[in-house]
Amino acid sequence: MASLDQENMYAPKRIVDGYFADNPRIMGHDSVDIWTLGLGNQITGTGNPNRGAALYCGQAYTSIEVVLEGQAATDVNGDPIGTTVFRGIAAGSFLPILAVQVQATNPSVSQTGELVALL
């Protein structure tokens, strides 16, 4: 019987080599609390190259408006051109998205741990 590596020869193991965009993306190797960061700010660790973060929702949200990594273009004032709104999010949910900013939440984020970006 062949080993797993031999059976999976079309998807070789990736290594961490200092080139962030080429490295494996593992959910949750770092985190940024959105309450501490504030809405409308770039999520720390998502810039240059523009790499997004998944979100953990510690409370239920009617809606969350985010800028995804593919929507990071800005207008002449530096405001994001495109956003995406997610609705009906249950407490304890993970959003497997690649957000670079959280623009707005309903209800608002009022304490640590309610909305956390996972890098």
Image: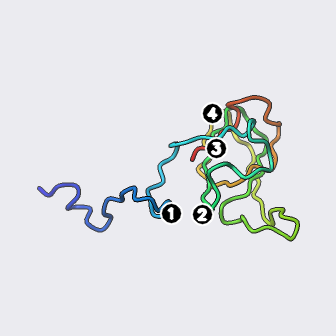
Quadrant of the rendered structure where residue 80 is?
bottom right
Q: Which residue is mark 3?
A: 117
Considering only order in the chain, which callout, 4 or 2, is on the residue closer to the N terminus? Answer: 2
- Closer mark to the observer between disc 3 and disc 4: 3
Q: Earlier in the sequence, mark 3 or mark 4?
A: 4
Q: Is residue 57 above or below residue 104?
A: above
Which mark sits nearer the N-terminus, 3 or 2?
A: 2
Could you say which is closer to the camera, residue 100 or residue 55? 100
- The quarter of the picture where the N terminus appears is bottom left
Q: CA distance from mark 3 to mark 1?
A: 18 Å
Q: Which residue is mark 1?
A: 21
* Residue 49, numbered circle: 2
Give me the C-alpha separation between circle 3 and circle 2. 17 Å
> Percent from the top left, x then y, of residue 15?
36, 57
Residue type, label 1: Ala
| Identity of the residue drawn at 52% across and 42% down | 28
